[in-house]
Image (cartoon, helix red, strand yellow):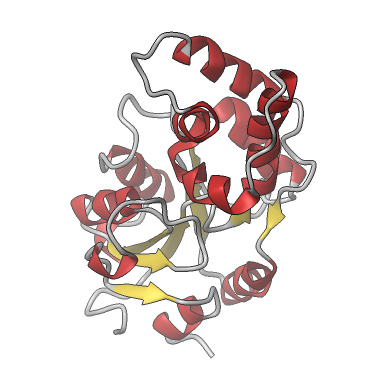
Amino acid sequence: MGPGPSPIQAVLFDLDGTLIDSAPDLAAAANAMRTRRGLPPLPYPRLRPMVGTGARGMVGAAFGLAPGDEHFDALKDEFLATYADGLLQATGVFADMRPVLQALDERGLPWGIVTNKVERFTRPIVAGLGLDDRAAVLVCGDTMPRAKPHPDPLLEAARRLGVPPAACVYVGDDLRDVQAGRAAGMATLAAAWGYLGEAEPIGAWGADAVLERPHALLQWLRMP
């Protein structure tokens, strides 16, 4: 499916699981906490799908606790502090995403980042990966009062870019990304290479298309 009657003037990406692979460092933080308590590390495939739900998901996977449970808040704070010490140990831009960003840059099509990751972690990572000077806009999880799946962060990104929401496409690897994009009136693309979570299957999210690999974005945009 093509971009429709309104030509796409900007591409917006989710961060974790869409643009960058941060799961190794997040999983390492969770397992470091288990090691401190004499618990064996969990297999990486068990932790990877939970990355999209942030500290809540990682603490849940590592210790079986949910918000409201005793000790959850303390473990969440410890997890965030542990993760802050190793933001860029193994995190990097997905290899297949690099040529896609290069193609967008060469075409002069602005792209940006809209993430639920808070600014405290997002800005050092984006800068450390050399994306800060390339991204036309960056909206973090605490930039607006309400984060995804609410559309406000995406609408703010479009406002900063000076582009109508209907002329933006949002690419993400979580159901919340599609929900937010649709609510903002944007085209939405689901990134099948991402973390995907444990919700309903990606094909049921209601995205305009499911991208199996990053390069499929260029095909959807009808870029050579």
Quadrant for the N terminus in the image: bottom left
Residue 39 appears at what percent x and percent y? 68, 27
Q: Is residue 75 left or right of residue 24?
A: left
Residue visible at 56% across and 70% down?
108
Q: Residue at x 48, y 81 (%)?
A: 216
Q: Is residue 116 above or below residue 92?
A: above
Q: Position of residue 150 (x, y in %)?
A: 25, 39
The vertical placement of 103 against 14, above or below, is below
In the foreground, 88 or 70: 70
* Number of callouts: 0
- The residue at 23%/66% (across/down) is 204
Q: Quadrant of residue 178?
A: bottom left
Q: Quadrant of residue 181?
A: bottom left
Residue 200: image x %, image y %?
27, 58
Q: Quadrant of the C terminus?
A: bottom right
Q: Residue at x 28, y 38 (%)?
A: 152
Residue 179 image position (x, y, % from top left) = 24, 52
Q: Is residue 22 visible?
A: no
Q: Is residue 162 visible?
A: yes
